[in-house]
Amino acid sequence: MPLTGHHFVEAQSYNSNRVLDILQPFEEAGAMKVDLHGVEGTLLAPLWGRAKFSREYPSVFNDAKAIELVEQIDYDFSTIDEGLRFEGTLMIVARAIQFDDKVRTYIAEHPTASVINLGAGLDTTFYRIDNSSIEWYDLDLPNVIDVRRQLLPEPDRTMYISKSLFDVGWCRDIHTGNGVFIICGGVLDWFEDSQVKRFLSLLADNFPGAEVVLNAQSRLGKLIGNFGLRRTGVKKMSTRWALKDARTMMKWDARIEVLDQFSALKNIPRDPAWGTQIERWMNFINKSRMWNIFHLRV
């Protein structure tokens, strides 16, 4: 399900101060041995989903860097693969496609903009959409950034920021002169409603006029997504935040403007090979609006 979310689950790590001693080089093969102490599903499931889908359906979505990363990591992905099933993998890819489209549209008008990837984990969006002139920032908790830096050393025009979402200090690291676009995938689901409100106000305080794209789930989506988490091996953590209509956010803070909201599967290409059952499932997701994309201005 999409709620394998992202990579690191800051809410639980942030609250419990979980220590992750993660990557140890394999002396023989050069692969990285991964030890994630219980959060591997949230860190690795999105990466695996993008890589597997890219191998099987490159005409729909192609993430060469995700494939490269999976090949570098010495890890048994079988539990994640079995738990995600096709539907969960498709939801991970759908979010990536929707985010890519939103970023590309913005940087077409603001080619030297700053793009901030919150809860970056092992996300590879930069490698898919880079226009050779944007400034890119990947933010995550220090232990996750340590992993990212070993597997994905910082390319030109990128900066890795080892801080919590709620540490306002990271906002001072961002160049804001040429426009700011913020992506927040699989992150806010893990927090309480009050924390999400506080976080969006933090963005409005520090990046007035910035655009933000994030995913959100309905209550039904949360229930189903948390069930899916168990299948990927994540036993002790559950998502918390659920919101079906982005317009509710405008009541939280008058500075929030809803530019767009739609089902995460809207306009996602369909392959006949997926069969009628998957087509019916996609239609149901679109109609029920269980998993959505919100596009805001703050």
Image (cartoon, grey):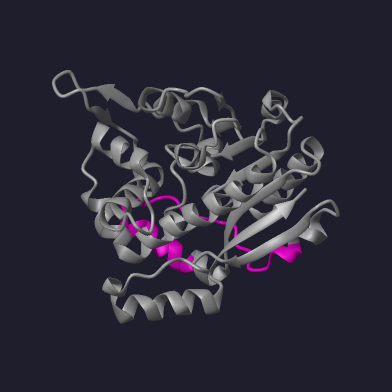
Q: Nearer the viewer, residue 177 or 13?
A: 177
**Residue 73 appearing in the image:** no
Please report the residue visible at 66 percent of the width from the left and 33 percent of the height from the top. 112
Q: Is residue 183 magenta?
A: no
Residue 225 picture quarter? bottom left
Left or right of residue 123: residue 247 = right
Which residue range is magenta in the image?
223-248
Q: Is residue 226 magenta?
A: yes
Please report the residue visible at 24 percent of the width from the left and 58 percent of the height from the top. 82
Q: From what the image shows, is residue 212 above or below residue 114?
A: below
Rendered location of residue 242, percent (x, y): 60, 62
**Residue 282 appearing in the image:** yes
Rendered location of residue 7, percent (x, y): 43, 42
Q: How many marks?
A: 0
Left or right of residue 254: residue 210 = left
Left or right of residue 290: residue 178 = right
Furthest residue to the top?
27
Q: Nearer the viewer, residue 50 or 1?
A: 50
Residue 259 picture quarter? bottom right
Furthest residue to the left?
28
Rendered location of residue 210, percent (x, y): 74, 43
Quadrant where the N terminus lies?
bottom left
Rendered location of residue 226, percent (x, y): 44, 61
